[in-house]
Image (cartoon, rainbow, N blue to C red):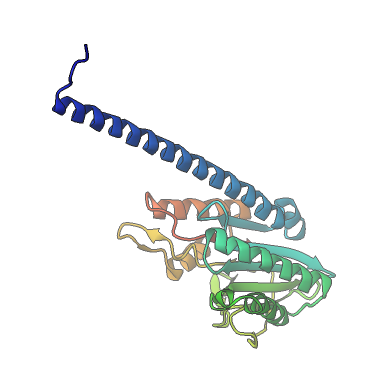
């Protein structure tokens, strides 16, 4: 003999079944999203290993510039900032660069920039920083304007500071795309400004070449804008160039390793609990 269930009970059973099915689907979607995030993070971590492999090693940098430091703090797992240090005959080259965007988009462009620096300086043996930037400018422009319409309108580019050091002549040549070079001599700081041109945006950009005679005790700093643009402090404002210059003047006579630590500790304290807003890159050296 069958028992007829009340209508309300049937509704309750059906509702419970639907809720169970919905919960099961939600749990499945949650697991899928978690797995996708894990896979994406694993891919980014592996990509960061590739990017780091393209950067000059600490040992190589120390061999070329024993009195130097590199403070490199990517905002994300991979970075849109990069540095390049190399040697061609008697000249040592140092570059700091900030690619369009950060994270994955910037990292893609950084790999192109690194390859162009290798080709221009090591293979083509071009020595003048302004000429090197012009060659890289055409290479970046060609890369993003010979493709589809979509890549042509992205205005991908690099802001870069590049110097060529001739130890025999005690001389540095510098050319910059927005990024400056700071020279500290006798507790005074001189700023050599870069041109207000982004590498890769215009095919025919020409860059200014600056020549600096070095004196004993001179210290040179090159950097991207991540350090000075970091928000923090008691009023949640940018660190700014004025405060950065004062800090460099304060620490310029310290050992390079200690300078790096102070710069790192200072920007961490300034940011506090605030997120890092951009990739950070600062290089200091003396000859």
Can see residue 21? yes
Q: Quadrant of residue 167?
A: bottom right
Q: How many marks?
A: 0
Q: On the rendered image, what quadrant is the C terminus found in?
A: bottom right
- Closer-to-camera residue (79/239): 79
Query: Quick check: 209 above or below 73?
Result: below
Q: Position of residue 6 (x, y in %)?
A: 14, 23
- Closer-to-camera residue (47/162): 47
Can see residue 179? no
Q: On the rendered image, what quadrant is the N terminus found in?
A: top left
Q: Is residue 214 left or right of residue 74?
A: right
The residue shown at (42%, 68%) is: 240
Farthest front residue in view: 1
Query: Quick check: 140 above or below 281?
Result: below
Q: Quadrant of residue 286?
A: bottom right
- Closer-to-camera residue (222/243): 222
Q: Position of residue 43 (x, y in %)?
A: 60, 47
- Closer-to-camera residue (139/36): 36
Query: Quick check: 31 above or below 274?
Result: above
The residue shown at (51%, 44%) is: 36
Q: Position of residue 118 (x, y in %)?
A: 76, 67
């Amino acid at each position: 003999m069958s028992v007829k269930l009340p209508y309300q009970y049937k509704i309750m059973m059906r509702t419970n079944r639907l809720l169970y099915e919905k919960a099961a689907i939600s749990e499945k979607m949650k697991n899928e999203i978690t797995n996708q995030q894990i896979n994406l993070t694993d891919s980014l971590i592996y990509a960061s290993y590739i990017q780091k492999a393209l950067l000059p090693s600490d040992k190589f940098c120390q061999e070329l510039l024993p009195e130097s430091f590199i403070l490199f703090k990517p905002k994300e797992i991979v970075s849109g900032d990069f540095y390049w240090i190399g040697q061609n005959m008697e000249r040592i080259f140092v570059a700091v660069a900030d690619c369009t965007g950060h994270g994955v988009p910037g990292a893609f462009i950084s790999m192109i920039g690194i390859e162009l620096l290798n080709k221009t300086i090591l293979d083509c043996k071009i020595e003048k920083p302004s000429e090197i930037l012009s060659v890289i400018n055409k290479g970046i422009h060609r890369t993003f304007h010979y493709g589809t319409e979509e890549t042509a309108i992205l205005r991908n580019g690099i802001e870069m500071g590049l110097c060529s050091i001739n130890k025999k002549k005690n001389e540095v040549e510098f050319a910059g795309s927005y990024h400056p070079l700071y020279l500290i001599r006798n507790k005074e700081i001189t700023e050599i400004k870069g041109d207000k041109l982004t590498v890769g945006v215009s095919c025919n950009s020409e860059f200014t070449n600056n020549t600096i005679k070095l004196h004993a005790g001179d210290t040179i700093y090159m950097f991207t804008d991540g350090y000075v643009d970091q928000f923090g402090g008691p009023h949640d404002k940018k660190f700014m160039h004025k405060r950065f210059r004062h800090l460099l003047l304060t620490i310029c006579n310290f050992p390079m390793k200690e300078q790096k630590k102070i710069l790192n500790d200072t920007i961490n304290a300034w940011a506090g609990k605030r997120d890092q807003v951009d990739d950070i890159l600062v290089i200091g050296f003396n000859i």
